[in-house]
Amino acid sequence: MSISVLGAGAFGTAMAVTLSQNGPVTLWARDAEQVQAMRESRENSRRLPGVKLPENVTVSAEIADALQAETLLLAMPMQKMAGFLDTHSDTLTGKTLVSCSKGIDLSTGQGPTALIRAKVPGVRAAVLTGPSFAGDIARGLPTALTLACADHSEELQAELSTPTLRLYRTTDTTGAELGGALKNVYAIAAGTVIGAGLGDSARAALMTRGFAEMLRIATELGARPETLSGLSGFGDLVLTCTSTQSRNFRFGCAIGSGEVFDPSITVEGAATAKALNKLAHARELEIPVAAMVLALTEQSISVDEAMQALLARPLKEE
């Protein structure tokens, strides 16, 4: 099968690099100047500096070039996906669309595969998610991800695996999507704890209680608990709550330390916190940590106030 990666951010570029081990890959970016620079330098210096693009990675700003492939990896911010699907729905029929986005669409409350199926009826939709940083994938460091697809496709699993990228498959698209989306909210919280100097013990407690909230909301929405305990849930939570390579963690650190965060950097967890709290409110679910993250991102509460609000909650059994 032929593959195109739509979106030349760090993760999209990394996937194009690693998948080129299996055959030719087209990497599409909407910015023609960025594409020209990548062609000349054979490097995405803006998003993934220091990683050379293999010869069989074709970089293009023409969407028609990318849409010739049978399998399309959608490596774009979650809040941009609906607009892309609306624009190109007529040319996506019959393709396999694999979302690499982690988040919840704010306007519909849907995850990636539900959004894809709603915008392009009858299309085959999957999601690729789990604990990974673009630089690790691009440099060939061992990485394991979850591939969620309703038809349990071993063929797609083999197509997207490489000698250093190991995929585990599941049919639980809901669980895989929610794990990848919700962990970003708690990565912001973990970063806030560290940025504010509250210590590693506080971070460990917050991660544990955050994971309990992830299970609560995900199972309410139809996810299987074992999916959340796997790579796409617990695995991704651990990675993003403990590394400065995580944009969401760095954003939280900035909140905790009172620094200004670069507004050009996409922080999916901020939008997801808003969508998550809306979903929880509609279902009368208690998610106090996520509620504090939303308040912090909206600057309606201070870090000290958020900490005191959580510590003052009634004592209870675990």
Image (cartoon, helix red, strand yellow):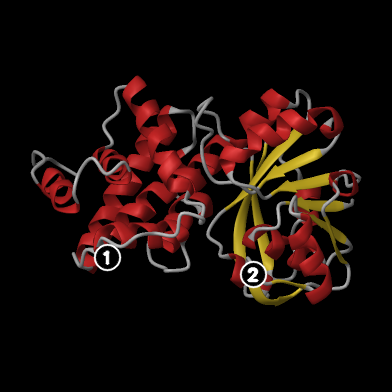
Circle 2 residue: 48
Residue 194 relative to residue 14: left or right: left
- Asked if residue 72 lies left or right of residue 248, the reply is right
| Classed neighbour count for the residue bearing mark 2: other residues with Cα under 10 Å, few (<14), some (14–19), many (≥20) | some
Residue at image x 16%, y 45%? Answer: 310
Residue kind at label 1, given as amino acid type: Ile
Q: State the residue at coordinates (42%, 68%).
A: 243
Labels 1, 2: front one: 2
At mark 2, the secondary structure is strand
- The numbered disc on residue 194 is 1
- Quadrant of residue 116 within the rendered picture: top right
Q: Residue at x 60, y 72 (%)?
A: 136
Residue placed most toward the observer, 142 or 11: 11
Q: Position of residue 39 (x, y in %)?
A: 83, 69
Tell me residue 183's x, y (percent). Answer: 42, 49
Residue 50 vertical placement versus 101 (above, below) = below
- Residue 30: give its label: none
